[in-house]
Image: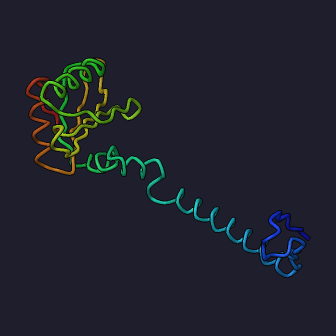
Amino acid sequence: MVKSKIQNPKSKINPNFKIQITKQKFCHLSFVFWYSFVICHLSFVILMSGCATITEGAKGIAGISTKSLEDSRKEAIVKTVNDDYQTAYKKAKEVLVNTGSYIYAEDTKKKMIAIYVTKEDTTPVGIFFKEIEANKTQIEVSSPSTYAKELIATRLFKVLNPEEKKG
């Protein structure tokens, strides 16, 4: 039982009013809390086990997801350059910056640079690097847009002067 501590004497509410929670109401409340707890946890588990993780979902909302670039890698333009990985990476990054492309993500684990064609044209393009030999690096340019992929590949390979290799 809870006793009210109202101090205003003009109040129409009896200051000695007592609230009683019956056993039945208490059981109902505990069931509601337990049910809410279970639903929240199940929702969390379902969200975490979906196709897109929360991290990738957040990147998608923020506009910096690279999933579409990774998915379109199978149709990428692939060429090999006569440079080691570090040199090819630095040259490619320099070309992208000098041609006005906007780099929005770099991932050293995936060995990739994700760009927008320009700051105004936010068509995503991914440049992936794969070290073939000590002085040979394979570069893959992927994008959901064929035009953007070909444009960036032309800009890159004009400067890097690669040997064409089918892959």
Q: Residue 126 sits in which quadrant?
A: top left
Q: Residue at x 24, y 22 (%)?
A: 88
Q: Nearer the viewer, residue 25 or 50?
A: 25
Q: Is residue 63 left or right of residue 53?
A: left
Q: Looking at the figure, which quarter contains the C terminus?
A: top left
Q: Is residue 97 left or right of residue 42?
A: left
Measured as percent of width and height from the top left, residue 81 is found at: 19, 25
- Which residue of the protein is positioned furthest toward the front in this rendering? 10
Measured as percent of width and height from the top left, residue 118 is found at: 16, 37
The number of numbered discs placed on residues in the rendered structure image is 0
- Which residue of the protein is positioned furthest toward the bottom in this rendering? 24
Q: Residue 139 sits in which quadrant?
A: top left
Q: Residue at x 36, y 50 (%)?
A: 60
Picture layout, residue 109 above or below residue 86:
below
Measured as percent of width and height from the top left, residue 58 is found at: 42, 49
Q: Residue 5 sits in which quadrant?
A: bottom right
Picture layout, residue 144 above or below residue 102:
below
Picture layout, residue 9 above or below residue 80:
below
Q: Residue at x 17, y 33 (%)?
A: 101
Picture layout, residue 83 above or below residue 110:
above
Q: Nearer the viewer, residue 80 or 33?
A: 33
Q: Looking at the figure, which quarter contains the N terminus?
A: bottom right
Q: Residue at x 36, y 47 (%)?
A: 62
Q: Nearer the viewer, residue 139 or 5?
A: 5
Measured as percent of width and height from the top left, residue 108 is found at: 38, 29
